[in-house]
Image (cartoon, coloured by chain):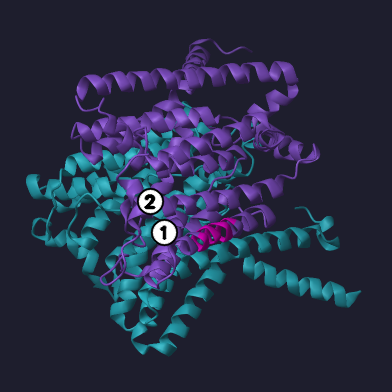
Chain colours: A purple, B cyan
Amino acid sequence: MTSELATRPSGDSAVLSGRAEGRQPLWRSLARWEAGLVVVLIGVLIWATIKSPTFTDPSTLFYLGVNTGYIAIMALPMTLVVMTGEIDLSVASMLGLAGSTVGYLWHHGWDIWAAFAVALAVGVVGGALNGLLVARFGLPSIAVTIGTLTMFRGLAEVLLGSLTIPSLGDRQFPESLTNIGVNSIPGAQLSWSMVFFVVLAVIFGVVLHVTPLGRAMVAIGLQPEAAQFAGIRVNRMKFWLFVLSGFISAFAGILVTLQQASVSYNVGTGLELNVVAIVLFGGVSIFGGRGTIFGVVLSVAIVGSLQMALVQLNVSADKQNIVTGVLLLISVIVPNGAEALRRARDYLRRRTRPRPL
Amino acid sequence: MTAIAERRATSGAVLTILRAREIGLVLLIALVVIVTTLHNPHFVDSNSIEQLLSGAALIALLGVGETLVVVTRNVDLSVGSVLGLSAYVVGHLFKYDHIPVWSGFVIGTLVGVAAGVLNGFIVTVMRVPSLVVTLGMLYVIRGIDGVIVNGERIDPEFIPSSFTAVGYKTLFGIPWLAIIVAAVVAVAGYAMRSFRASRDLYAIGSNPAAAALAGIPIQRRVFTAFVISGALAGLAGALFLALHTQIDNSGGIGYELAVIAAVVVGGVAIFGGSGTVVGAALGALLLNTINQALVASRISAFWNQAIAGALLLAAIAFDRWLSLRVTKTLQSAEGAHRDI
């Protein structure tokens, strides 16, 4: 028990320093983080507007939504999962499995809405499998979800093999639905996937920051044992968050299938790390208990608009990778930078100072 | 009374065997090979055994470095990108600068060392969680790789044949590649058992606070673990080039998760403190054997990934069950007064 406390200095100090005092610096540091993201976002927008003449076109916003919306949607449940100190690396594979399920059933003559329903059910079952292994059997989520990452993608491959649906002789997906990849919603330059993201972000934000449910998630992330003693059903909460993550990822799989008007088993391969990067860049602590939905929304806006600008400027995908990685590194190094400098100074001082006897 | 004690003793013995993860893995590999051979006798001809070993060798080599890092409660997600960068750099130097063959391995390793130093520096000096650092580095290094590659591909005719010989020549039917990796595993395995610095890694992973109080230089040890992981990933890059004889910007994509899978199947606890490099290497061999077995059993190749994933889950769950049983045995009457 003591070791557990000692290895989690953040939770420890919050507990020891009392409620009111413990919370104040936390809020201040969070405010700083989101304020920093706002500054970065403004900087990116100004830079992009100057550099790329087409950046201010209304269509930019639409394509930003098409390119980023479905990834951003998966970042929301991921935020909650990371908030409780776990991680779900199977999201992109679930996206692929759900898309492949829709494709498979469509190929076999099913109604599109029935296919959607089955795909969402697959998401729930897959998420429940993750949740069961993590919450019920107490297995480490990073290992479990690497396993289900492989398995879900494998099942998608079993369903579709090397087919791309619609394949030769298939019906096309209904045009009224695939239009979400071509047309924006009436009256604004927002893509449907972006609208879904915004609506979900509001819901997730309210749940996480205003309701007792959300406070419970934060508590679990800060101190699982204390949360348990405080009467929070830690395992049940984790289970349902994994189910939610599977469900939303399946929904994202349906969206991307419709946007592209086609699906193959490998859709979205490797996106799990993009989703994690967005969440962490948004200021959510990988150890749980820290972070806001607002930060994740800002992170989506920054990453999305930066990517649009780089594409418009014909910057290669490789350099975009570098930018993504450097952003992520800076986002964690900067807050720790001052602390690291202080440690370095102390260290040097200790070195030069004669040893006390 | 005696019957109970006896039963306990036997169950204790069974547990001891199961706990020696390496034995269990070897038995599993043997089982897979035997069952597959009954279906398809060609599975054990020399050609496919070569494939079996070569295919597992690179992941096993990365697994050694990953074990060192994971044992300290950290993780290195950048190994796949480091492998890709190192392989391309070596190939590029062969094509344009005609460097001597031996320096290919040295330069590959040095590329990895550079990446490892950067990872280790950010993790230990900046005190940033390694998952975040190495995830960022995964992107940065892959991006740098892409910029250097610039759409080019180094074709086999530019790679010296004495270099690629490592990939295809064999000694008594065992590929040189596998021999090199086995040597690294043996050295690392001995070091992890017997050297003080490497025992420190286990102490750090078991209980960081206690390790600090015991005077273990935690940051220095963790830094070293990252540097070694980087170095081995760099060496694996050179070997990747020798095996595949050509390289573009896609070398090693997705390897990071395959390596972690092998390490976990090999019995290394993802939260640090226990596991061996031999186990990790056998984990890589088992996963590759299963893949090859599925191919040889003429099960549709589409099933490979799904089954591999299910097996991975089974391995993790089995581990958990085992550790619960072991704890129970230790807590039982005879264990109580034993010095644990």
- A70 and B226: which one is in front? A70
* Residue at the spot 29% in from the left edge and 18% down from the top edge: A46
Image mark 1: chain: A
Question: Which residue is most to the right?
Answer: B1
**Magenta region, residue range:** A117-127
CB-based contact (under 8 Å), mark 2 and mark 1: yes
Q: Secondary structure at mark 1?
A: helix
Above or below — where is A150 with respect to A78?
below
Residue B177 part of the magenta segment? no
- Where is residue B280? Give x, y as percent: 48, 59
Mark 2, secondary structure of its residue: helix
Percent across and percent down for residue B208 are 61, 37
Instruction: Report the predominant secondary structure element of the magenta stretch.
Output: helix
Dot 2, how many residues are within 10 Å of its Cα: few (below 14), some (14-19), or many (20+)?
Answer: many
Instruction: Count the numbered circles shown.
Output: 2
Q: Are marks 2 and 1 on the same chain?
A: yes
- Asked whether residue B277 appears in the rendered view, the answer is no
Q: Quadrant of the N terminus of chain A?
A: top right
The correct choice, above or below, for A345 with respect to B114 in the image is above
Give the distance between the C-alpha atoms of the residues marked 2 and 1, in whole angstroms: 8 Å
What amino acid is labelled 2 in the image? Val
Q: Quadrant of residue B323?
A: bottom right
Pick the residue in front: B326 or A92.
A92
Q: Name the subunit of mark 2.
A: A
Q: Which residue is mark 2?
A: A256
Residue placed most toward the observer, A351 or B76: B76
How far from the left and from the top, in percent, is residue B178? 33, 65
Q: Which residue is mark 1?
A: A99
Q: Earlier in the sequence, mark 2 or mark 1?
A: 1
In the rendered structure, the answer to whether residue B86 lies left or right of residue A280 reads left
